Amino acid sequence: MVHKPWGSFTNLSSGDGWHLKIISINPKSRLSLQSHAKRKETWVVIEGDVSSVVGGDQRQHRPGAIIQVPAGVKHRLFSRAGSKLIEISFGEFDENDIIRYEDDYDRATK
């Protein structure tokens, strides 16, 4: 498990061109507004409430929702009560392939 200021994630498995992890978001927390050049992501909400921003589109989600994030598109997650998601990345997975545009924890890179 990798702890972050907004919650944590657990890497589960990976293969040629894909990576699978579980993301846990703490109540009243949000991830950076960020993008990835080398991968696209698919999120599946499995528990709690989630708000997403993908490009200019902001939406609310409940368990069972599927959210698509194309490579290079700015995106962010937020949860009021706490949540868990499955993340499947497709492409070249690298935790350093991240550009942070806004961040509540002073980690922005642009």
Image: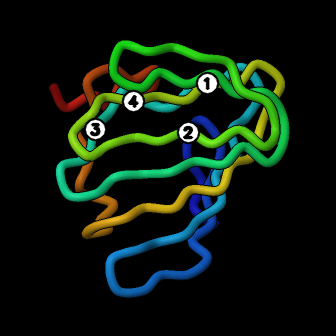
Asked whether, in this view, residue 100 is left or right of residue 67, the answer is left
The residue identified by callout 4 is: 75
Q: Residue at x 59, y 17 (%)?
A: 59
Q: Amino acid at mark 4?
A: His
CA separation, marks 4 and 1? 11 Å
Q: Position of residue 91 (x, y in %)?
A: 28, 67
Q: Amino acid at mark 1?
A: Phe
Residue hosting label 3: 35
SS category of the residue bearing label 2? strand
Q: Mark 3 or mark 4: which comes first in sequence?
A: 3
Residue 6 occupies which quadrant of the picture? top right
Packing grade of label 4 (10 A; few <14, some 14-19, many >=20) is many
| In contact (CB < 8 Å): disc 2 and disc 3 | no
**Distance from Cα at disc 2 to Cα at disc 3:** 15 Å
- As drawn, the label of residue 67 is 2
* 4 or 41, nearer to the observer: 41
Residue name at image x 72 percent, y 43 percent:
45
Residue that label 1 marks: 78
Closer to the chain start, of discs 1 and 2, is 2
